[in-house]
Image (cartoon, rainbow, N blue to C red):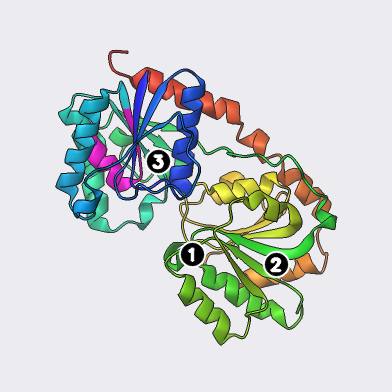
Amino acid sequence: MKILMIIADINYGAGKMMTTVGEMLINRGHKVYLLTYLNNTRKNELDSRIVHLQNSALKKGIKNNYIRKIREIKKAIKNVNPDVTLSFLTDANMMNIIASKICHTPSIISERGDPNTEDSLKNRIKKFFYNFTDCIVFQSNNAAKFYNKRIQKKGVIIPNYIIKTSSNKTNILNRASNVIVVGRLDNFQKRQDLAITALKNLHEEFPELKFLFAGDGPDKEKLKSIVSSLSLEEAAIFMGRVKNVSEIMDKNKYFLLTSDFEGMPNSLMEAMDAGMIVVTTDFSPGNAKEMIFHGVDGFIVDRDNPKQISDLLRKLLNHEFDEIAISQKATKITEKFNKEIIENQWENVFLRYQRNS
């Protein structure tokens, strides 16, 4: 079976998951092609067996021209002649549906984030186009509920699984009592400003506490400016893009996710697998509760509430919880989201909807 995968850019969470699905398919004997239409660069490693189609139109102002992007996708479909296409994220999904319909090719699309956060016009447009796909993969029931019954009937729930499990877990009591914040520095979604405010609330009481920000993004300078204005330069460390985040996770106790909205964040699952004590906001559309049992294998706080974050971290720093028990239970995330089962679910979707199946 030949699969053409379509996404704007593979350098963030959704792209990381897409390429992982691609590797799984190749390992099971299928042929995989990847088209990125906004960014041909690869900061993440890409399996050499995946054929990365370099988009020749990128240098010709294609970025905001949907018609030209659809033409590029259609051209790729005709050249590859796949048995089925797969796309991640709204824009790619809509364009994939159009191009695949024109080429009489089955399409599978996947909702990776929170559909509630997009503007009303785009939501109306995508709700129309999503009626014409063959299958839509949701990460959770919460995301599926956003759509009408017709679209839900085309849906299948396939959660994320941990891409790279931690094989060397240091005892939680032997790790540094620091907080790591992993993710793109995009304050609109990720709300790292809340982490900085929480750090400010704790700094006087815990002057040795460090918040380590692993990631890069458009709001890096803005966030560094906030840190500077609060005189937290020695406590808030911006590490930039980190190649092996698992090493940092293994050396530090606490993981903090402050997002307003997410799909099923890979970094949160990886932190739990590493045995970290995780604290996350109850990000929309509510998937944190599908991943964490509050107070047992992690903690969930309200969105946009830095005081609640700092109050909880203060209790952790004062050893008011059984960190060993929480750490051990957090690692059970790999059983809750079993890799082999989820990989089988993905392959079964492709086999079901491939051309002439």
User: Closer to us: mark 1 or mark 2?
Assistant: 1
Task: Give the alpha-carbon distance from disc 1 to disc 2, as whole Å.
Answer: 23 Å
The mark nearer the N terminus, 2 or 3, is: 3
Give the magenta-colored segment's residue range. 85-97
Label number found at residue 185: 1
In depth, the one of 256 and 298 nearer the eye is 256
Residue 134: horizontal and vertical position, in percent?
29, 28
Q: Helix, strand, or loop for circle 1?
A: loop
Q: Amino acid at mark 2?
A: Leu
Return the residue nearer the eye: 56 or 291.
Answer: 56
Q: Mark 2 or mark 1, which is nearer the start of the sequence?
A: 1
Q: Is residue 142 visible?
A: no
At 58% from the left and 56% from the top, the residue drawn is: 242
Camera-side residue of 4 and 133: 4
Task: Tell me the number on the disc at residue 325.
Answer: none
- Check disc 2 and report its element: helix, strand or loop: helix
Residues marked 1 and 2 touching at CB (< 8 Å): no
Residue 243 picture location, percent across and down: 58, 52
Mark 3, residue position: 144
Name the residue: 54% across, 29% down: 342
Give yes or no for contact between labels 3 and 1 (Cβ–Cβ under 8 Å): no
Outermost residue toward the top?
357
Disc marking residue 312: 2
